[in-house]
């Protein structure tokens, strides 16, 4: 039973990504495409079955792709083992400035953890000041 659950986890995407389609751009940067995005990238470190992560994604959904690109990093994947240090703090957010390419070792500067700190996010991405619904922050 346990073995079948482990094997099935490797063949399907984590449940967090199966909820509903998200307007999240996962841009593959190649020499043939535009190498650097014109908006910053908000990197969210997550793992399967993270309820706080689902809440954060829902809160960020209206602003993703307009004010920033949201890149999800599953810390349980072997290629992302560098970020397992966040296993008790997810969701953790890093911000990549415009013109910076993400790598497995470098994913921007630390911004916040556990929940969306709208004041910090608005300070980091000033374009969010254009959103009247965020005026209370």
Image: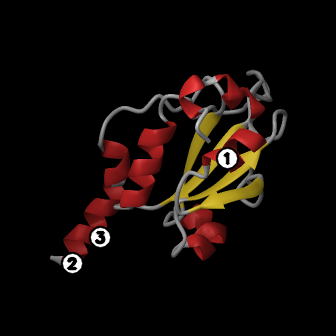
Precedes in sequence: disc 1 or disc 2: 2
> Given this view, does label 1 or label 2 mark the residue nearer the observer?
1
Q: Give x and y (percent) for residue 66.
A: 61, 23
Quadrant assignment for the C terminus: top right
Residue 23 showing in the rendered view: yes
Q: Give x and y (percent) for residue 59.
A: 46, 41
In the rendered structure, find residue 6 and report the number of the disc placed on it. Answer: 3
**Side (left or right) of 94 relative to 116:** right
In the rendered structure, find residue 119 and report the number of the disc placed on it. Answer: 1
Quadrant assignment for the N terminus: bottom left
Along the viewing direction, whichever of 54 and 128 lies nearer the viewer:
128
Precedes in sequence: disc 1 or disc 3: 3
Work out which residue is located at the far right of the displayed protein and give it. Answer: 99
Above-or-below relation of 24 to 54: above
**Colouring convention used in this rendered image of the protein:** secondary structure
Task: Look at 74% across and 36% down and name the residue there.
Answer: 125
Task: Look at 47% across and 49% down and name the residue there.
Answer: 56
Marks 2,3: beta carbons within 8 A? yes
In the rendered structure, find residue 2 and report the number of the disc placed on it. Answer: 2
Along the viewing direction, whichever of 61 and 1 lies nearer the viewer:
61
Q: Give x and y (percent) for residue 62.
A: 49, 28
């Amino acid at each position: 039973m346990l073995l079948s659950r482990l094997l099935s986890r490797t063949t399907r995407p984590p449940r967090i990504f199966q909820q509903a389609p998200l307007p999240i751009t996962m841009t593959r940067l190649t020499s043939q495409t535009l190498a650097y995005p014109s908006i910053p990238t908000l990197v969210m470190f997550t793992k399967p079955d993270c309820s706080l992560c689902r809440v954060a994604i829902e809160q960020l959904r209206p602003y993703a792709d307009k004010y920033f690109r949201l890149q999800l990093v599953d810390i349980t994947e072997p290629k992302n083992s560098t970020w397992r240090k966040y296993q008790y703090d997810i969701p953790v957010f890093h911000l990549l400035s415009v013109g910076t390419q993400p790598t497995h070792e470098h994913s921007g500067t630390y911004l916040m953890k556990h929940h969306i700190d709208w004041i910090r996010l608005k300070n980091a991405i000033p374009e969010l000041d254009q959103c009247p619904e965020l005026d209370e922050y």
